[in-house]
Each structure stands twice: as structure tokens, then as C-alpha cells.
């Protein structure tokens, strides 16, 4: 009886290792897949904190595939401002000025509404393996969830963060935590999932914190209050005509 | 005619006090005109010189793609082998130095600065060995030392350092994007503070060694610009054509831009200012002219009885008219001579020593690239104009009241109070 009990304990202890038998490429691919939907609609808010205080912006967002998305801000200060992302390009629309601005090159590095998220962070397809070489560093529990710790080193200089360390859920392949560093290992930003929600059987982040590690008291929290996966969307939502209408 | 001239000169000598006072009024007006003109021209001249010495250099070689996107300071539109081009330019007698300009976020730590903070800055990466061949920062160092190649160090403008509370020995962190777009952070020590005479530079200047910046930004020996020193010459375009033909042999994408093209915005503002300068000079001229007119009118009106006496004794109106105008011209001539002498004396001080406006310039941006001492400039045409204006205007303003007095009958002239 004692022997059976010991075997059961050993088997339970080996579960994480059995799960980690998966290759790093598979983990990354499943992580990318978990973040990509054919279509989605979300509603939420961005809470930006810096040394001058806190600011809240609310938004509605529509997305199709990995390349197209539209964010419309609904908070009083930014009401009607829209950010349209198509493949490789970002357009901003300011209703007060009736002005459409195309962002490209260095302008993509500007901060979105003064937060720690840049326009560039919103761009790009979810093909992490094309940009990074990944290695598994180990496993760790984050908020009671077993995660793979993966270090990713950029393959080229065109990637914003030369080194990324991510904590990927072993079961859902959601990223619970990420650290973004320079080539020399200087920590720049940290992302942490503070809460999740289940939508159509998928576990998704509902509350995510991004902090700039070089600036004191600089933090952005993105909260999703509503999320729909694969809703029917009119393709014209992602057109320039719709942006200025 | 000889009699009329002699009479006018005798009158000048006879009424010494009036002649001296009137001449002084004219002289002061003309002196003001000469000095204001000198200050305005000096401000513009020195401003443009400081622009070339500390901002734009005489000419700059850039990748044509960089020029089109220069507001975004793209590091990938660069000059791959700047030193080879500088060498080729040197063979033809031109002096050049490479620079890389990029934007960054400067992070200040509480350890040195007392509180945490960050601000956007523009970094100028220079080659400490050759930069002073083209720019003039070597004479502006007021604290610490200048940069050395390969070190993790920065030199700050004194006003910028003052605004930050930075001192030599403090550390700052720069977060920027390297060539390609990757994030990079660098810790740099403040090793020197320069007091640059160009206020726009002194307010924002952050310089670091170009090889250090190149390592962090993965520039692989490239620079975003080559700055060139050209001799002061009217044939600047000829030099530019020559430089363009030299660089065309190395790289088709490179183009040379004159400092006028680089400082187009400043020159547009300067052009607008020139209109304002003309108005200021016109107002100064009007003040001087009103002073001269007023003094001459007083001088004529107080002598109407004398004029009546001369007519009663049989002197013709035209002779009296001529005598008064010659007398006014004499006063104008004396005033103009002294005005030019005083103006030249004041201008000598202005040109050689200048006036220190540092306290005013520190907190306001007048658009001029002058930080403290405003020096004047010699402008012979303004001096000649002032001299002739003082002389001719005096005769002109004497014409009208004399003619009016001559229309009065003799008894009315003699009774005039």
C-alpha cells in the first residue's frame, strides 16, 4: 500500500515535467495561436499612472486576424479618437481636427495616449519564432499556474526588444508574465497578467499591467470588461473610409 | 551770394548757444540711429555666425533619404563610411567631422538629482578628435573636461545642466532606439559643462563620443552626417558643387546641403525680423527727424522780428530765404559731423566690447542665436545716410517756416512776439 502511494506521489510530481516534454517551438506556436482570433470585439479601459497622477481612457476594439484592428476611444477626453492598424501601417484619426495621420517609421515608437504601450507594440503579426530564437529556462508557478520560463533573443536589430523572458502557462499557453530587456540584459519593461476571464472556453487576460522599469511610478493597466471571440464583423470596419466617417 | 554765405556763417557764430543746442539735438538723434542700426545688424550677423559655429556648420553631407525624413532622425539612413569621405574631402582641402544625432529619453536618478525624472532629449554624438576642427566648442568649456573617444560620458550645455540640476560627476541614463529599431539603454557620466554662445544649443545640448554611441546603436562605423567647415566666401555655391562632385564618386545617395538649407526655418524668421528691424530704424529716424525739425522751427520762429528788420532794410526775400537755409544747413552739418563722431565712438565700444544682455536672454527666446553679449557691426552706408539726412533735413525743415514768415508783411514781422 505504501509503495502504491509513493508511486502516485511520484507520478503527480512528474506531471509538470511530462508536460514540459513539449518543444519550445510548439510552445511558442501555441502561444501565438492563443493570442490570435479570426475576429474579436472587446471593451475595456487603460489606466495610466505616472509621477503626475493617474488617467483613465475607455475604448472599444475590433480585430480581424493578426493584422487588422480598430480601437475607438470612448472616454470624454479622447472621445472619437480612432487608431486603425492594417498590415504594417497605423492611422490615427482626431475628430476635433478632422485629421487623419498615418504613422510610419520612428513615429510608431510614440506612446499610445501617454501609456507605457507604444503604437509599435500593437503592430506586427504573431509569428514570434520568425523574430526570436527561444530556449526554455525552466518552470515556475505564477499565481498558482505552472509556467514554462522561456528566454527569447532577437534574430535581428529590427525587433524592438532584443531579449524577452516570458512565463507561458503550461496548459492554456497564455503569457502570464514577460520581461523586456536590452541586449545587455537591462530590464526595460515588465508585463504581468493580474486577472483572467474565460471566453468561449479560452482563458484570456482580463487585467494586464505594463510597467516601465526605468521610470519610477510609471505603470499602465489594461482592463478588458467585455470580450467576444469570432463575432461577425463587417470588413469595412477596417477601412480608411470608416475611420473618418 | 558771398554776402549771403558770410551772413549765414556770422549768424551761426553770433548765436553760439542756439547753434550748439540745435547741433547737439541733431547729433544725438543721428548717434541713436547709427547705434541702433549697428546693434540690429550685429545681432543678425552674430546670430548667423553662432548658427554655423555651433549648430549647422558651413555645410552638411547627408544621405538623401535622411534629408527627406530628417524630423524623425532615422539612423538607418546613414553614411556608411564617413571617415573615407572625410579623407577624400581633406585631399581637396576641405575639413569635415562626422556626427550622429538621435533622440532619447533621459532618465534621472534620485541618487544624483534628488528625485526621479525623465525628459526627451536630442543627443549629438561627436568625434572629440575632429569636432573642434569644424565647430567651436573648445573655448566654451566652463566645468570639467571635454569628451574623450570611447568613454561612456556626456557633456551638457550650461543652461540645460542648470535646469536639470546636473553637475560634473553625475550619472544619467539614456533610453533610445538603435539602428534597426531595437531598444537600448546606456549609463553615461557627466564629465563636462559647456557654456555655448548659441542659446538654442546651450538650452538643450547633450554630446557624447560618436564611437560610444556607435557601439550602443549598432551603427557599424556609420554616422548620420558629415559637417564641413568652409572659408567665409561669397562663392559658397562653388564649394558645394565641388564637394558634391567629390562625394558622388563614393556614394550616389549622399548630398551636400548648405547651412542656409539646414537653417531654412531660422532664415525665414530672420527675414521677417528684418522687416521689423526696418520699422525700428524708421521710428528711430522719425524721432531724430522730429527733434531736428522742432529745434529748427523754434530757431526760425524766434527770429521773425530779425527777418522783418532785414526786409525793412531792403534785403530781398530770396536772399533772406537763402541765408536762413544756409544757416540751417550749417547747423545740420555741425550736428551731423558730431553725430557721426559720437555714433562711431559708441559703435567702436559696441563692436569691440558689446552689451551683456545675458539676464534677459536666459529666460526668453528672441529667435536670435545670441546668448549674452550683443555686439554691434560697422555699417558705412547707415553712417553716410545718417550724415546726409542730418544735413539735408535741417535745410528742408528751415524752408517751410522761413517761406511762411516771408509771406507776412514787414510791420507784422516786426511786431511778432
Image (cartoon, rainbow, N blue to C red):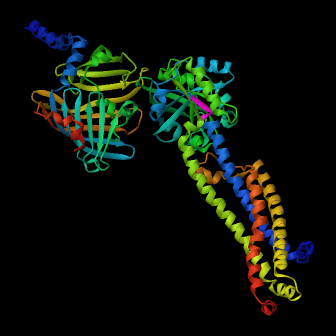
Q: At which x and y percent is residue B152?
A: 56, 25
Residue B8 shows in this picture: yes
Position of A215 relative to B363 (above/below): above
Foreground pick, B63 / A140: B63
Farthest residue, direction top: A3
Frontmost residue, A64 versus A115: A64
| Image quadrant in which the C terminus of chain B is located | bottom right
Residue located at (19% from left, 25% from top): A36
- Foreground: A79 or B244? B244
Q: Relative to A191, is B274 on the left or the right? A: right
Q: In this view, does B208 lie above or below B220?
A: below
Quarter holding the N terminus of chain B is bottom right
Instruction: Describe residue B170's horizontal placement relative to residue A134 as left or right.
Output: right
Where on the picture, by quarter, is residue A242?
Answer: top left
Q: In this view, does B412 lie above or below A180?
A: below
**Could you say which quadrant of the image residue B138 lies in?**
top right
Residue A29 drawn at (x, y percent): 22, 17
- Is residue B196 at least partly visible in the picture? no
Q: Is residue A139 above or below residue B358?
A: above
Q: Position of residue A14 (x, y in %)?
A: 18, 11
Nearest to the observer: residue B83 or residue B162: B83
Tell me where residue B393 appears, x and y as whole percent: 75, 67
Left or right position of A114 against A63: right
Q: Which residue is drawn at 89% across and 76% down?
A: B11
Question: Is residue B196 located in the magenta-colored stretch of the structure?
Answer: no
Q: Where, by quadrant of the figure, is residue B384 drawn?
A: bottom right
Q: Which segment did they paint magenta?
A: B56-60
How many discs mark residues in the rendered view?
0
Amino acid at each position: 500500500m505504501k509503495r502504491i502511494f509513493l508511486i502516485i506521489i511520484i507520478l503527480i510530481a512528474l506531471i509538470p515535467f511530462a508536460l514540459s516534454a513539449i518543444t519550445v517551438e510548439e510552445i511558442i506556436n501555441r502561444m501565438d495561436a492563443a493570442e490570435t482570433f479570426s475576429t474579436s470585439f472587446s471593451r475595456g479601459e487603460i489606466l495610466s499612472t505616472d509621477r503626475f497622477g493617474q488617467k483613465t481612457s475607455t475604448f472599444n476594439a475590433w480585430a480581424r486576424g493578426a493584422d487588422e484592428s480598430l480601437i475607438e476611444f470612448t472616454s470624454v477626453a479622447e472621445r472619437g479618437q480612432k487608431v486603425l492598424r492594417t498590415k504594417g501601417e497605423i492611422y490615427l484619426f482626431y475628430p476635433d481636427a478632422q485629421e487623419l495621420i498615418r504613422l510610419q517609421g520612428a513615429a510608431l515608437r510614440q506612446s499610445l495616449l501617454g501609456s507605457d504601450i507604444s503604437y509599435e507594440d500593437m503592430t506586427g503579426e504573431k509569428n514570434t519564432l520568425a523574430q526570436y530564437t527561444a530556449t526554455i529556462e525552466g518552470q515556475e508557478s505564477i499565481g498558482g499556474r505552472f509556467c514554462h520560463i522561456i528566454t527569447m533573443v532577437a534574430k535581428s536589430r529590427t525587433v524592438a526588444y532584443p531579449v524577452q523572458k516570458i512565463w507561458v502557462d503550461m496548459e492554456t499557453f497564455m503569457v502570464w508574465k514577460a520581461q523586456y530587456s536590452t541586449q545587455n540584459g537591462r530590464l526595460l519593461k515588465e508585463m504581468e497578467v493580474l486577472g483572467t476571464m474565460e471566453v468561449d472556453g479560452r482563458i484570456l487576460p482580463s487585467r494586464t499591467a505594463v510597467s516601465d522599469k526605468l521610470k519610477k511610478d510609471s505603470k499602465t493597466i489594461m482592463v478588458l470588461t467585455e470580450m467576444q471571440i469570432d463575432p461577425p464583423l463587417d470588413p469595412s470596419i477596417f477601412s480608411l473610409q470608416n475611420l473618418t466617417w | 551770394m558771398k554776402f549771403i554765405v558770410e551772413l549765414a556763417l556770422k549768424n551761426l557764430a553770433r548765436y553760439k548757444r542756439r547753434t550748439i543746442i540745435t547741433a547737439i539735438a541733431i547729433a544725438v538723434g543721428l548717434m541713436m540711429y547709427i547705434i541702433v542700426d549697428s546693434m540690429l545688424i550685429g545681432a543678425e550677423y552674430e546670430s548667423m555666425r553662432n548658427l554655423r559655429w555651433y549648430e549647422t556648420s558651413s555645410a552638411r553631407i547627408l544621405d538623401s533619404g535622411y534629408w527627406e525624413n530628417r524630423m524623425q532622425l532615422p539612423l538607418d539612413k546613414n553614411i556608411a563610411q564617413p571617415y573615407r569621405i572625410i579623407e577624400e574631402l581633406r585631399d581637396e582641402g576641405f575639413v569635415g567631422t562626422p556626427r550622429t544625432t538621435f533622440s532619447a529619453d533621459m532618465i534621472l536618478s534620485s541618487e544624483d538629482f534628488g528625485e526621479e525624472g525623465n525628459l526627451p532629449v536630442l543627443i549629438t554624438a561627436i568625434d572629440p578628435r575632429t569636432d573642434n576642427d569644424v565647430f567651436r566648442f573648445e573655448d566654451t568649456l566652463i566645468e570639467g573636461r571635454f569628451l574623450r573617444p570611447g568613454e561612456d560620458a556626456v557633456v551638457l550645455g550650461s543652461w540645460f545642466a542648470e535646469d536639470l540640476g546636473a553637475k560634473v560627476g553625475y550619472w544619467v541614463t539614456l533610453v533610445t532606439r538603435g539602428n534597426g529599431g531595437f531598444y537600448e539603454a546606456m549609463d553615461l557620466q557627466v564629465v563636462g559643462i559647456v557654456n555655448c554662445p548659441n542659446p538654442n544649443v546651450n538650452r538643450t545640448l547633450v554630446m557624447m563620443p560618436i564611437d560610444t554611441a556607435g557601439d550602443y546603436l549598432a551603427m557599424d562605423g556609420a554616422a548620420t552626417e558629415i559637417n564641413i567647415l568652409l572659408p567665409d566666401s561669397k562663392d559658397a555655391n562653388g564649394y558645394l558643387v565641388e564637394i558634391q562632385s567629390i562625394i558622388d564618386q563614393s556614394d550616389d545617395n549622399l548630398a551636400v546641403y548648405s547651412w542656409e538649407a539646414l537653417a531654412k526655418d531660422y532664415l525665414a524668421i530672420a527675414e521677417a525680423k528684418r522687416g521689423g528691424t526696418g520699422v525700428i530704424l524708421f521710428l528711430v529716424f522719425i524721432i531724430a527727424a522730429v527733434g531736428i525739425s522742432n529745434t529748427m522751427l523754434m530757431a526760425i520762429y524766434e527770429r521773425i522780428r530779425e527777418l522783418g528788420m532785414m526786409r525793412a532794410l531792403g534785403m530781398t526775400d530770396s536772399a533772406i530765404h537763402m541765408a536762413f537755409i544756409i544757416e540751417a544747413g550749417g547747423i545740420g552739418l555741425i550736428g551731423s559731423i558730431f553725430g557721426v563722431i559720437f555714433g562711431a565712438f559708441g559703435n567702436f565700444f559696441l563692436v569691440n566690447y558689446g552689451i551683456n544682455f545675458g539676464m534677459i536672454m536666459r529666460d526668453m527666446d528672441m529667435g536670435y542665436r545670441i546668448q549674452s553679449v550683443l555686439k554691434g557691426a560697422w555699417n558705412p552706408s547707415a553712417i553716410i545716410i545718417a550724415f546726409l539726412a542730418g544735413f539735408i533735413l535741417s535745410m528742408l525743415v528751415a524752408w517751410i517756416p522761413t517761406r511762411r514768415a516771408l509771406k507776412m508783411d514787414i510791420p507784422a514781422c516786426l511786431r511778432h512776439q
